[in-house]
Image (cartoon, rainbow, N blue to C red):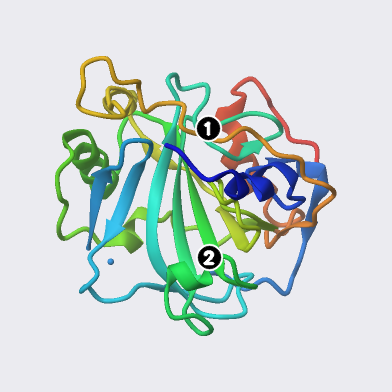
Amino acid sequence: MMFPDDIWFVCAKGHLQSPINIRLKDLIFDHTLKPLTLTFNVSNMGQDVSILLESDGPPIHFSEGPLSYQYRLHGGVIKFGSTSQIGSEHRIEGKAFPGEIQFYAYNSDLYQNFSVAVNKPYGLAAISLFLRIGQSSTPDISALLSSVAEVRRLYGLILNTLFPSTREFITYQGSLGFPACYETVTWILLNEPVTVTEEQMKGLRTLRMSEFKNAGAMADNFRPIQKSNNRYVRTNINFNASVSKLQGFYRNLNRDLKEWKL
């Protein structure tokens, strides 16, 4: 994919670029963060697996949490690796999950649509769901991933059921992970991965960037980690009350780790 030269400037020179590596010792507990309070298509877009909302469907909004405005869901993308040791864009203590589903939303209180909001203050929000390998997955995750592998439309999926039950998260100010890398995104990383099977991940890894036989694999479509530049990374996870939950979130990153030292 080709872009004009000036579209790369912020990607290379910006100070609030995404993704970043999350270090537990740098997390700041913010008690003012409230909990965060849907039929669509999936499509093989040639470089990423994208989730496209029906334009005539009912709007889906996100609000509260770290957000001061209401944000309307625009679409999403699935990042994944060629092995289960890599795949997610964001990392925790330098370690990656096998994949990451990112949902992008725009500030519908201030802006008319995604294109208008993309480079504006408080323009975008992105919610990340990490993927982990397990014995089984939920029916809606299974339906989503199978429709991606078959490159077909998916109807009747309730987006809310894709999200884990937790309302705890990590948040920071960052950027789009693709050109023009505008630094207008409030990132929200949910504090519980969703489970997929190894077979489902293998199905994603068969996807190619085009229908041609020698086309490159779509796996490893994640952006490298960017400098955090001493950004504040906040969370509503109460470390004193939620240590077990925090341990559960990261356990699959290192199964031999017995205790997280916060």
Q: Secondary structure at mark 2?
A: loop
Q: Report the front residue among 98 and 251.
A: 98
Q: Which mark is residue 235?
A: none
User: Callout 1, which amino acid?
Assistant: Phe
Q: Is residue 135 above or below residue 173?
A: above
Furthest residue in direction right, as rendered: 230
Distance between mark 1 and mark 2 Cα atoms: 27 Å
Labels 1, 2: front one: 2
Q: Report the front residue among 223 and 22.
A: 223
How crowded is the residue under tag 1: few (<14 C-alpha within 10 Å), some, or many (20+)?
Answer: many
User: Callout 2, which amino acid?
Assistant: Val
Residue 193 spot, x, y in % from top left:
48, 43
Q: Is residue 96 above or below residue 76?
A: above
- Residue at coordinates 40% horizontally, 67% vertically from top-left? 73
- Which image quarter holds the N terminus? top left
Q: Is residue 98 above or below residue 51?
A: above
Residue 146 spot, x, y in % from top left:
20, 37
Task: Point out the tag, 1 or 2, that comes first from the N-terminus.
Answer: 1
Q: Is residue 16 left or right of residue 61?
A: right
Q: Evaluate if marks 1 and 2 touch, with contact meaning CB atoms under 8 Å apart.
A: no
How crowded is the residue under tag 2: few (<14 C-alpha within 10 Å), some, or many (20+)?
Answer: many
- Residue at coordinates 39% horizontally, 38% vertically from top-left? 195
Q: Secondary structure at mark 1?
A: loop
- Residue at coordinates 59% horizontally, 32% vertically from top-left? 251
Furthest residue in direction top, as rendered: 214
Please name the residue that numbered disc 2 is placed on. Answer: 118
**Count of all numbered marks drawn on residues in the image:** 2
Residue 148 spot, x, y in % from top left:
24, 39
Q: Which mark is residue 97?
A: 1
- Quarter residue 163 falls in: bottom left
- Which image quarter holds the C terminus? top right
